Image: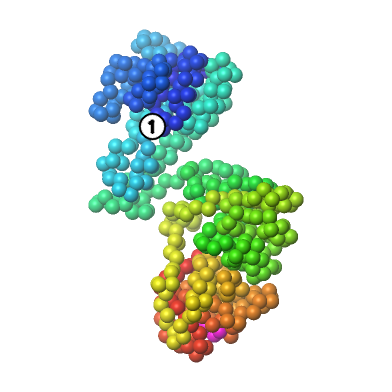
Amino acid sequence: MAVIKQALISVSDKAGVVEFARGLQDFGVMLISTGGTAKLLKAAGLSVTEVGDYTGFPEMLDGRVKTLHPRVHAGILARRDVPAHMGAMQDAGIPAIDLVVVNLYPFSQTVAKPDCALAEAIENIDIGGPAMVRSAAKNYQHVAVVTDPADYAPLLREMASTSGAIGAEMRFALARKAFSHTAAYDGAISNYLTALDAAGQRDPFPTRLNLQFELVQALRYGENPHQHAAFYRDLDPAPGGLGAYTQLQGKALSYNNIADADAAWECVKTFEQAACVIVKHANPCGAAIGASLTEAYRNAFATDPTSAFGGIIAFNRDLDAATAEAVSQQFVEVVIAPRVSEEAAAIFSQKPNIRVLTVALASGGNTLELKRVGGGLLAQTPDNLNVTESQLKVVTQRKPSAKQLSDLLFAWRVAKYVKSNAIVFCVDGRTLGVGAGQMSRVDSARIASIKAAHAGLALKDSVVASDAFFPFRDGVDVVAEAGATAIIQPGGSLRDEEVIAAADEHGMAMVFTGFRHFRH
């Protein structure tokens, strides 16, 4: 056990620091502090020695140099179990520092501001703070280091149970957290600086990409039982992303559960109306909007009941009892919603194997999408483009009706989340057939129509979305024969004229979006 006799406190994030310092002082700990932290603690009536008085060397260079002093770092780095270290400390009149409480200048928050200038970013690069944190973490066998205000209360509880000491297990845990903290800090600086060009413009892709994630859970296995797997999330996950989920009930999530749940959630949260999206093997197999969640669910499920078996079901509204009752009649792996009513939760509790998650319904998401390849990493900005009616270009003799336009935009939104090549039949704000992941677009069109037939759904007067252009007229012929009367697609093929002529032959309406939604 390492008894805490002297602590150095210097924090940028001052949340809870006064109460923590008061708790330390109640254990008889002497406090050293710097600048604004010292002023705050003194104003709260605490006895504090300012670091300039402690070192005998006043702060200088506008505060750039204050803790970079042997009296500070020797006090932190000295090994208490090495007589030569302690002898040198005694000869120099340097007392030991047993606890370092430091969090760093807010660099990430500063550079996140759209108007942040390089000079401001540079001033928010902490020097003394990381040096103290790393010194204390290196000497964790004798010194405790705290970088996170969330650790204040647990540390005080441990000191209360050990007569003012901090045990080896907690010191090691704090040290691991401290090194991760400085690694993330340095990574953020590197990401920012290596993304700047000669003119100071910021590129989304730094020349040296540093990533930081924290382990959420080890998974039973990966995509297959012979693969090991784990789930990590961003250190500061986006509020609307799956990484910030809360699990209300059910077994632990699997690798495939998480991947499919993300696909379902990202799709369903794009709709303004009450919506349901059902995903199986990373593809929406049913999607619908409705006057109620129950209506949306029933229509989404009816698209492909066979594929929906054991699927992931996502809703963009608070889950009510009626919808929970309908969902619980089917075999489902995961249910996701912004919130779940008490009545709905009680219904799901009768099916304890159903994993029920809540995720905040918020905009925003990952700044980069990442995919590993052998020996490297692909990075791209997210596909956040959403077409509006005013952006559509009618290219056929027949113009789509207002109802068709509404369905075309719905179909296009769903197709964005279907693996390429994607073909989606829709009508009345619901999917009728989905063709996904085929090597040829015409085969996706055939599969989508076959899926609808298997579900007993008529495609007469439906609309179709294609995530990329039709390279030949054959895909248009297939969807027209199935009963579709309108198509939305990007356009841009060398054979656009041939494809448009095919649509005109069939008396179909066709609109171009001008951009595609490949998803691999």
Is residue 79 one of those drawn in magenta?
A: no
**Secondary structure type for disc 1:** loop
User: x, y (%) of residue 440?
Assistant: 54, 76
User: x, y (%) of residue 187?
Assistant: 40, 42
Does residue 285 show up?
no
In the image, 341 versus 267, the foreground residue is 341
447 vs 227: above or below:
below
Q: Which quarter of the rendering shows the N terminus? A: top right
| Segment colored magenta | 476-480
In the drawing, does residue 105 fall left or right of residue 22?
A: left
Residue situated furthest right in the rendering: 350
In the drawing, does residue 278 fall left or right of residue 393?
A: right
User: x, y (%) of residue 427?
Assistant: 58, 75
Residue type at the position of mark 1: Ser
489 vs 62: above or below:
below
The structure residue drawn at horizontal position 51% and vertical position 62%, both measured from the top left corner, is 272
| Secondary structure that dominates the magenta span | helix
Q: Which residue is mark 1?
A: 12
User: x, y (%) of residue 412?
Assistant: 50, 70
Is residue 478 one of those drawn in magenta?
A: yes
The structure residue drawn at horizontal position 50% and vertical position 27%, both measured from the top left corner, is 152
In the image, 445 versus 295, the foreground residue is 295
In the drawing, does residue 430 fall left or right of residue 454?
A: left
